[in-house]
Image (spheres, rainbow, N blue to C red):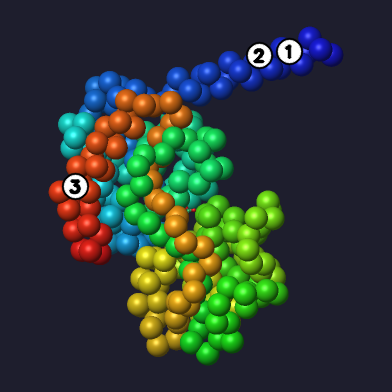
Amino acid sequence: MKKIMALLLSVGMLLSFAACSQTRSLADIQKSGKLVMATNAEFEPFEYHDGNEIVGIDIDISEKIAEKLGVELEVLNLEFDALIPALQGGKADMIAAGMTADEDRKKNVDFSESYYNAAQVIIVTKDSPITGPADLAGKTVGVQQGTTGDKYCTNEDGESEYTVGEVKRYSKGMEAVSDLMAGRLDAVVIDSFPADKFVEKNSDTLQVLEEALTENEEYAIAVPKGNKELLDKINEVIREMKESGELEQIVNQY
Ligand code: GLN
């Protein structure tokens, strides 16, 4: 039995080594001529569809990184909860998806310096009796699957300050917002900037509550664990963009 376990363990280790070696070095990226960035283009203004094109703040930042490396940018559009597995499996070189650099994810990926500070906010209808996070108790709340909003509302680790009744998970934030407008949800918990965009489009029926559910979520770019060379380049670009004011300019443009 012990032998079998040892064998299984070593096979497992070999497989994970194989997975590691699939992630590309800086030299590999430059040789191939393209930087593959994975995202979930359902998150305006960070990444969203404009006709057939995927555009947004994360795309603009990623373009800068590709430019720095002297390669083309390729955008891989996936479900949000498929992003980290794709990075680990070597399908992408980095993730730029309004992703919060949270402690759980740090076990699986390395994060760049932060480029945006966000919050998890609550969207409700204008006639809703919900006026703040404490009113979510017993209510049905929509979230985007696999996000920090999902984690906070689901509260598996018991760390959340507020409790909600039932959590409904959606692959697209927009679908949660539609269900809210159709009366199938009491509230939607989602990141602040996308929330503003959703509400902007439905400002006669929806509102973002003033009191946020959480504050201080730092968005950062994720790279495969240990890819320091690539991470250093990304950090260089982020720093340059902050110092020159270009980052702020891009954010304001959306
Ligand atoms: N910032 C949130 C997270 O990292 C949501 C990101 C997203 O939906 N693209 O979980």
Type of amino acid at the residue the image marks with label 3? Glu
Q: Residue at x 57, y 68 (%)?
A: 142
Total numbered circles: 3
Residue lying furthest top? 3
Residue 25, visible in the rendered structure: yes
Residue 57: x and y in percent read 28, 55
Mark 2 residue type: Ser
- In the rendered image, which residue does mark 2 sit on? 10
Query: Could you say whether the residue bearing mark 2 is in a helix, strand or loop?
Result: helix
Residue designated by label 3:
243
Q: Position of residue 178 (x, y in %)?
A: 50, 75
Q: Position of residue 88 (x, y in %)?
A: 48, 32
Quick one: quadrant of the C terminus? bottom left
The quadrant holding residue 152 is: bottom right
State the CA–CA distance, disc 3 to disc 2: 47 Å
Mark 1 lies on a secondary structure that is helix
- Is the C-beta separation of discs 1 and 3 under 8 Å? no
Instruction: Looking at the image, tell me whether mark 1 or mark 3 is earlier in sequence order.
Output: 1
Q: Quadrant of residue 66?
A: top left
The residue depicted at 62 percent of the width and 75 percent of the height is 134
Dot 3 falls on a residue whose secondary structure is helix
Q: Residue 242's mark?
A: none
Please say if 148 is above or below 65: below
Image: 54 above or below 6: below
Q: Are marks 2 and 1 in contact (CB under 8 Å)?
A: yes
